[in-house]
Amino acid sequence: MKINKIKIQNIKSNAWKFWALLLLLFSSIFSANAQDTIKVQNHIIDNQIQNQIFKYPVVYTNSNIKDFTFTEVSYEHQQNEFARKQVANEINTYQFLAQGYFTTKSRWKLFGDLAIKKILEKNLGWVLSDDRAIEQEVINPHYFYVPRKADWDNQVYALSGGFSKDITNHLSVAVKANYGTEKFSRTLDARSQITNRNLGGEMQIGYQITKNQKAFILGSYAENQKDFTFKYNNSNLNLEVYPETYLRFNAGYGRILNSFKSSGSGYLYQDIVDKIGLGYTIKGKNSIFTALYYAQNSNNIFYTSDLDLKVNERMKIKTKSNHAELFAFHKWNKKEIQSTLQFDQSDAKNFDKQSNGYNYTNSLNKISWTASLAQKSDSKIDYLVGLNLLYQQNEYDDVLSTTHIELNSLNTGIYTSKDFAFNKSKLNATASFNMYFPLPSKLDYYDTSGGTNIRFFDEVIIYDYAVNTTNYFEPELRLQYSYPTKNNKTVVFFTNLKEKIAVKKQTDYPVSINTNTTYWVQMGVQLNY
């Protein structure tokens, strides 16, 4: 199952031509009038514009955005049947979310997010790190594992915020900062405990070229540190004669290091991420068009001790990423259209200081497009129709194991939403239908360990490859009931139901996978004002 790999330079070239064409088309609809007020709802109808406001606030320093605050308390149950191997069989999540945007009398724009989560995972095997294979085809190397399944008790706290303002008639600035801490605890041998701390900041500077046009640059820096320790209730279980509990270390995707010992009381991970980019936006009374690009570097270091000394460095993952994005928004009468086109490309290499060479690489490519057309009467959604496309072409190589994987896929979807109004309240129904199509892919493996690590290949690598090359259908339904209260507040009760239904396996490997339906159920209450 061999495909011809798309050349990255051709994708980039075509993307820039497409940018120029879209810019030419949209420039004809922009006027010199001041922009109307942007009203953001905590709903799929405004997801795209809301993401732009929080990711690139320097673009909106002179926009009229109505103040808003969203708070949410919810519970989610996820039952994983058809899923990759390094995923818990059951996940229960309790969370509190808050988001706000305010403009002061002196035109300072303040914004922020808060998330508090309690996550209980049942029966998770083959990984002792905080990485999960729910959204990743292949999780990053540098993690310990035992095949034996166990429960995890996890806590996540994340806080981000910032401000933006026009400093002069031509100069504007936006500053963002984020802080997060996480704790992951496994409740059975080996009893892992992982503590994450991350801190980062970003600055965006814009220059107003004309009344309607602005150019901007952005730069960010973040440091993430992860402390990892483990211990056994019964240390005798950490012997090769007990394969279910014997601790092993994955240094790639199939390269297994046995008896990996710490020189201290634990292990340390450090990740340093920097980003620099530029963009351009043009705005009219009822329209916004933004084009941007940024490059990002990540240097993730694994230490064989809880001290970040150079002598303790063992593994390094260096990742270089490129991101290009186009966003368009236009409204007329009661209708509005939003469209986001994104291109992401990254290359990563895993360096082993002991063997003095690279043992693992990956190359990830993704093109995604989301577009929607909606009609709103005041705060009522008359209708919404949208579509999304995701094309991925990813390649993974474990040089020393040896594993070579090419995964290619196309994910397509449509979604729709409508409000049903009563005297004061309203009921919203939102439905989406996604279909995942695996494209021709490839898996090659050669065991250089003499057969001692073949189980990881049989039970993880082949299994996940079979899941990744299986068609699946993913429908989702969301119902929410809104009731206005005093002081312009709205109480919203909501429930979500989503399923992942396997359709047809594509791989030629004789492996049996669980194709029972995976489903998510969520319910909660929001306070919006």
Image (cartoon, grey):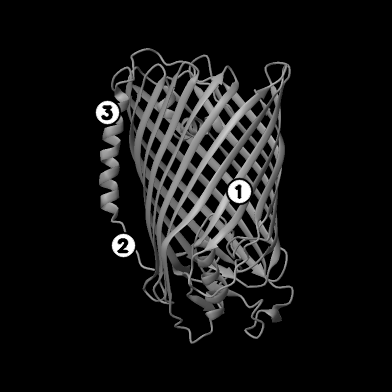
Say which of 24 and 122 sits in front: 24
Instruction: From the top left corner, tell me how far across and down residue 514 is, in percent.
Output: 63, 65
For the question of whether residue 443 can be seen, the reply is yes
Mark 1 or 3 closer to N-term? Answer: 3
For the question of whether residue 139 can be seen, the reply is no
Residue depicted at 60% across the width and 28% down the height: 418
* Quarter of the rendering containing residue 243: bottom right
Q: In this image, 177 relative to 280: left or right? A: right
The amino acid on which the numbered mark 3 sits, given as a three-letter code, is: Leu
Q: Which residue is mark 3?
A: 24
User: Farthest residue in the front direction?
Assistant: 504
The amino acid on which the numbered mark 2 sits, given as a three-letter code, is: Asn
Instruction: From the top left corner, tell me how far across and down residue 167 is, in percent.
Output: 39, 21
Crowding near the residue tagged with mark 2, few <14, some 14–19, many ≥20 C-alpha atoms within 10 Å = few
Q: Which residue is mark 1?
A: 181
Residue mark closest to the camera, 2 vs 3: 2
Residue depicted at 25% across the width and 46% down the height: 13
Mark 2 lies on a secondary structure that is loop
